[in-house]
Every structure is written in C-alpha cells, then in structure tokens.
Amino acid sequence: MFIGHFAPAFVAAAVSPRSPRLGTLFVAAQLVDWGFFTLAMFGAERMRIAPGASVMVPFDLYHMPYTHSLIGAGIWALAFFAIVAILQRNLFAGVMAGLVVLSHWALDWLVHVPDLTIDGQPPKLGLGLWNYPWIAVPLELGLTIAAFAFYLRRTRGPVGPPMVLLAVMLLFQAINWLAPVPASAGPLLYLQALIAFALMTALAVWVGENRWFQKRGGLALSVE
C-alpha cells in the first residue's frame, strides 16, 4: 500500500471543520513509514530486496518491530494524537490524527505478505493481496480516488491544487509499480521514499490551505 494510505487522510479532513488540515493528516497517514525509513537508515529496522517476496513488491520487510507492529503503530498514533491535540488545543483533531496514523497498519495488513506483527514477535501477519495484482491495484486506486472525491465534495475551493496533488500521487504510484527492481536496499532507496512523502505532503499543505469545509446547507466554513 502506497498512496492508498492517504485515503483516510482525505476522509478525516472532510469529516468536520474541527479536523486537522490535510497536510497534517498526510503526515499522519505515512507517519509509521517516515519512522521506518528513518530507522532503517540507522539499522534499527531492516529490509532487503528479495525478488519474488510477493508478486508486486520485491521487498522482504523482515525486521520492523517499532513501526509495523500493531502495538508500535499504536504508540506512534498516541504520540501524534497528543502532539496534534496539544498544539491545536483540539481533542477532536488529535483523535482524528491518531486514527489516521493507526489506519496505516490496517491497510498494510490487507496487502502485505505476512511481515506485520502484534508486538514485534511472531506470528507474522498479512492478508497478502500483493500476490493478487488484479485485486490490489483496483483496491489502492479505488480507495484513493473515492476518498479524494469525498474530500472535494465536502470542501470548497480552487480545483487546481487538489488536481495537481492527485496527479503527483498517481505519478508516484505508477513509478512504485513500474520502476525497475532496486539493486539493493540502502540509504538511497530510503531517502527516495522520504522525498516522495515530503513532496506529496507539501502539496497536501498547499491544498489544505486553499480548501474550506462545506457544511450542510451550503455554508462554507474555513478549516481551522
């Protein structure tokens, strides 16, 4: 799962004017992957290139107890909940941000081959939809586009920024699916992932600053 992780961010941003802005929720959506690739640079979590690990993804994610265990993801979610709730003085915003962080593990469980855990120890979990591209591809695109459409329907503002964001997201997803298999896992690969997250998040900040929540009855409220 790549851009599909941003689907909960779009939905959460459109639920209420008390929700965090889209940029904050984009951080939440990929927070555990920000953590994973950062920790991987220092060897605290590890992956390797293993063609055949799954049909779609040649990554053996064999050691990621701090970010991709359910308990680990829960800790990241609680931490982000606290940060957002305190900085925005908004408990609801914190809850929404925390739930988006936690959604990452659930979405990964759908597509990952068994490499997720509850507490960093076996058994390893994952439904393995990466082995079924005819399911995984429509699922990822469908979740993303449906959530994006929901966000556009519930908010008002210029259509240009969100369309640019969607185009960039789809471009990165195409690269993720179609690019040659990396020769090895290492800092360059991890940095490329972090740069992709950063670019999409920067665009989400731009989008969020130019959209307003659409309340029932047609009144547009600024997103706080």
Image (cartoon, rainbow, N blue to C red):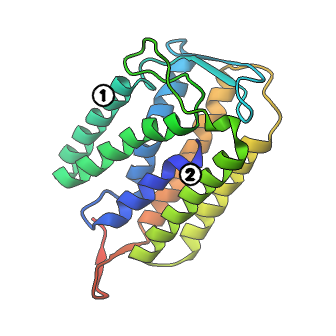
Q: Is residue 96 above or below residue 40?
A: below
Expressed as whole percent of the image width and height from the top left, the position of residue 213 reads: 34, 73
Taking the spot 62% from the left edge, 56% from the top edge, the residue there is 141
Asked whether, in this view, residue 20 is left or right of residue 202, the answer is left
- Please tell me how crowded label 2 is: few (under 14), some (14-19), or many (20+) other residues with Cα within 10 Å: many
Give the number of the disc on residue 189.
none
Q: What separation in Å lies between label 1 and label 2 (alpha carbons)?
A: 24 Å
Which amino acid lies under the numbered mark 1 shown in the image of this protein?
A: Ile
Q: Quadrant of the C terminus?
A: bottom left
Q: Quadrant of the N terminus?
A: top right
Residue at which label 2 appears: 200
Expressed as whole percent of the image width and height from the top left, the position of residue 8 reads: 43, 53
Taking the spot 74% from the left edge, 33% from the top edge, the residue there is 55
Expressed as whole percent of the image width and height from the top left, the position of residue 208 reads: 42, 64
Residue 192, image quadrant = top right
* Camera-side residue of 123 and 174: 123
Which amino acid lies under the numbered mark 2 shown in the image of this protein?
A: Met
Asked whether, in this view, residue 69 is left or right of residue 85, the answer is right
> Is there any visible trace of residue 90 in the rendered image?
no
Give the number of the disc on residue 75.
1
Which structural element holds mark 2?
helix
